[in-house]
Amino acid sequence: MSDRRRRRALATVLGSVSVMVAGLVTLPAGQAGAAAAACTWQKTVWDLPAGADVGTLDGYDGDRWAVGITGNRAWMGEGITDARGTLWDNGKVALRVSGEIPHLNDVNASGSVVGDTVVGNEFVGITVDHDGTTHRLPGDPAWDNYSADLVSDNGDIVGTATVDLKFRVVVWPAGAPGTYRVLPTPDVTYLHLQDVDSQGRIIAQSDSSVGGLVWDTDGQWRKLAPIGTPWAIRDGRVVGGLNATNAAAEWTARGGLVRTIAGGAINATAVGGNGTVGGHRFVNSQRRPVLWRDGVVSDPLSTVGSGFVLDWLSNDERTLVGVESRRPVAYDCG
């Protein structure tokens, strides 16, 4: 399983938490209905290409564009056969690549798609046009492999390169096309870039002893304290989960804990344009999506399916985007 595949990784985390926590957490009745729902959420199942019956999502721009993979159910397990990178425009398929590569890893508000492909025996970072044409990003010949993993709304591309099994974080700045810079990178055995915000802050997941890392605008990496797994960042607000307690949490861009979210919260996975946080909690031993404001339930999402994995909130917070029953879906505020 590729660790680029955010939704599947999140589903695995939630599944393991369910085994440990289900039946142990019961939300007080008063708290379960603490906030009246502002929306009646209406579900839209996104299109799949002809011949495909499942799909996942890896990147969403907060408005219209999303990337992921589509393919067919494997005979056993949660795998996907004939998996191909796919671009959606408002839930409609705009591009499906012709083979297993290139991978489409992220997309921004301008519809700029980034990913990686194989040239010779190496992975290289690329941008991808909407007709499937790829353009190789410049790299250092000393790199063993490199990939474009994230793209911010201002067009900065962020990725990783490996040199002798060591990770390097690379930025291809929008303001200086054809150039790149290598950021100082922690010496870790595992590094997965998870998200970048419009100001260029980056969050990454790393070794279990290190946990999450944040690259702030002052040019430094900092560990989340206490150790946690970050899932999203917006305007310097980091959300995720505490590793030791399996609780949702929020941090500053410098890694300082803002709050732990109580009430059966498992993980925070998204931040909307107005600061609402989305994630998952247990309600009477059932895992459900939820929205919080300042650590308090703002919408219990009672009309949203319990199997919906909430990955993103739109910029206007009127759309929830994720996967349900192995299909990309959106819930819109009605």
Image (tube, rainbow, N blue to C red):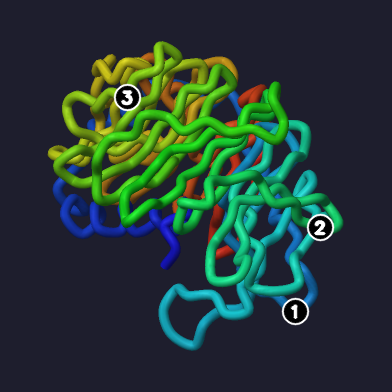
Q: Residue at x 51, y 42 (%)?
A: 159
Quadrant where the C terminus sits is top right
Seen from the viewer's position, the closer of residues 298 and 1 is: 1
* Foreground tag (3 vs 1): 3
Type of amino acid at the residue the image marks with label 1: Gly
User: Which mark, residue 51?
Assistant: 1
Type of amino acid at the residue the image marks with label 3: Trp
Q: Residue at x 34, y 46 (%)?
A: 191
Q: Which residue is mark 3?
A: 221
Q: How many marks?
A: 3
Q: Which residue is mark 2?
A: 133
Dot 3: within a 10 Å radius of its alpha carbon, few (fewer than 14), some, or many (20 or more) residues?
Answer: many
Q: Which of the marked residues, 3 or 1, is nearer the chain's N terminus?
A: 1
Type of amino acid at the residue the image marks with label 2: Thr
Callouts 1 and 2 close, C-beta under 8 Å: no
Q: Residue at x 33, y 38 (%)?
A: 267
